[in-house]
Image (cartoon, rainbow, N blue to C red):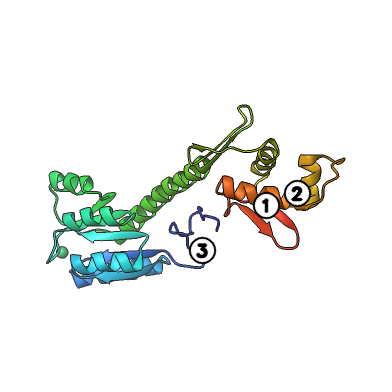
Amino acid sequence: MPFPNALGKGMRGETNLEKRKILVIEDEKPIAEILKYGFEKEGFEVFCAGTGAEGLKSAEERQPNLVLLDWMLPDIAGVDVCRLLTERENVPILMLTARSNVEDKLYGLESGADDYVTKPFDLREVVARVHTILRRFEKVQESRRTEASCCSIAVSEEEHTVLRDGRPVDLTPKEFDLLLFFVKHPRQVFTRSALLDQIWGFDYLGDTRTVDIHIQRLRRKADLGEQLVTVFGVGYKYVP
Ligand code: CA
């Protein structure tokens, strides 16, 4: 499944059709309601929790894209909720605090919050900050994904080596050529005879079964079962 990265798409792999979710952990109902109203108007799906415990449970169940977290909660201190959230979930947090003490805010940021807003707040300011945090967070997620996909299989043409998750893979020259060809042409579908022509040459007399056998070996040796995809009735493609 391709990872969505543009704004408006979910960072947890949702499609565009699914709304991004915000969890509001706030015990003051009127404030929670204002936030719910404001973010629903912005196109978010909003869940509210009135206690820290409820918030932690809801975060686990709903997998929100962002948490708006009140600093003063009846059961667990916001700062502890913040710490627990960042330990368990990969989710950005915007802290809502009535405190004007700079040290409190720094303490909150050190506990894993991404930003804070001081109460009483202007709804537009909260909305703007949420958009900023989401943009930043999604950018980081995206670059992590790119790194991960680059690292999982590394083919060096010069050194004639293949590393799968950092471990060398021992391939025959033809297996290597075939893998290199796929890596150079990601997502393109090739028929068996096109691959035969490309890798073995036009004058090769073997049949297309040769390609199937090499694909199977590549999948097994380099653990490429999910990357070397069979396109039914057509051939094969490489999906990084
Ligand atoms: Ca409160």
Label number found at residue 15: 3
Q: Is residue 31 above or below residue 85?
A: below
Observer-nearest residue: 207 or 50? 207
Q: Amino acid at mark 1?
A: Lys
| Quadrant of the image containing the N terminus | bottom right
Residue 30 location (% of width, % of height): 22, 72
Residue ID for mark 1: 237
Asked if disc 1 is less than 8 Å from ligand 1, the answer is no
* Residue 41 shown left or right of residue 88 in the figure: right
Above or below for 131 versus 110: below
Q: Is residue 174 visible?
A: yes
Q: Nearer the viewer, mark 3 or mark 1?
A: 1
Q: Amino acid at mark 3?
A: Thr
Regarding ligand 1, which quadrant of the image does it lie in?
A: bottom left
Q: Nearer the viewer, mark 3 or mark 2?
A: 2
| Disc sitting over residue 210 in the figure | 2
Which residue is rendered at x = 70% and y = 51% of the image?
213
Q: Residue at x 21, y 48 (%)?
A: 111
In front: 92, or 231?
A: 231
Q: Position of residue 18 (x, y in %)?
A: 47, 67
Residue 183, picture quadrant? top right
* Distance from the alpha carbon under mark 3 to that under mark 1: 23 Å
Label 3 neighbourhood size at 10 Å, few (<14), some (14-19), many (20+)? some
177 to the left or right of 110: right
Residue 79 point in image, percent of width and height: 17, 54
| Cβ at disc 2 under 8 Å from ligand 1 | no
SS assignment at label 3:
loop
Crowdedness near tag 1: few (<14), some (14–19) or many (≥20) residues, C-alpha within 10 Å: many
The reply to whether discs 3 and 1 touch (Cβ–Cβ < 8 Å) is no
Compared to residue 5, the image places residue 178 above or below, namely above
